[in-house]
Amino acid sequence: MDAMGHVNNIVYLQYLECARVGFFEGKGWNSRDASPTRQGPVVVSQTFNYRRQLYYPADLEVGVACTEVRRRSFVQSYGLFRKGSVELIGDGSGVFAWLDYAAGKAVEIPPDVRAYLTRA
């Protein structure tokens, strides 16, 4: 929170991260898996557009949609809303590579993940 009582601008990206983790965990992806064959998303870039001021405290909801799937990466779009309303606080998007964590490089998105990402 800043001196004016606004939610700090970096916190918005944390809201998006929580929504992204929930998106994957909702399909059984274990974000705490530490196995040597572990794969998963890694942030390549993110944008966020601040549409309304947000004061602390506030209850929010984040909408998440996968808007593009590539061979080794995908794009997710977000809408941040005041809970129980259609008031858009902000929106953004992120590009994520599918990473083989042990190798430290992007790999093809597995078919089961691709199917989940492309489902309406």
Image: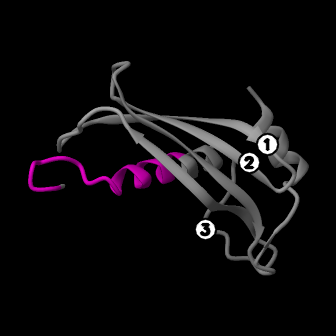
Which of 105/117 is in front? 105
Q: Does residue 56 appear to the left or right of 99 in the view shown? A: left
Residue corresponding to mark 2: 74
Q: Residue at x 83, y 44 (%)?
A: 114
Q: Residues within 10 Å of mark 3 (few under 14, many from 20)?
A: few
Q: Residue at x 26, y 54 (%)?
A: 8
- Marks 2 and 1, how far apart in space? 4 Å
- Disc on the earlier residue, 3 or 1: 3
Q: Residue at x 82, y 74 (%)?
A: 37
Q: Position of residue 30 (x, y in %)?
A: 66, 60
Task: Give the residue type at disc 3.
Answer: Arg
Q: Which mark is residue 69?
A: 1
Secondary structure under tag 3 reads: loop
Secondary structure under tag 2 reads: strand
Q: Residue at x 18, y 47 (%)?
A: 6
Q: Which mark is residue 32?
A: 3
Q: From this viewpoint, is residue 27 visible?
A: no
- Marks 3 and 2, how far apart in space? 21 Å
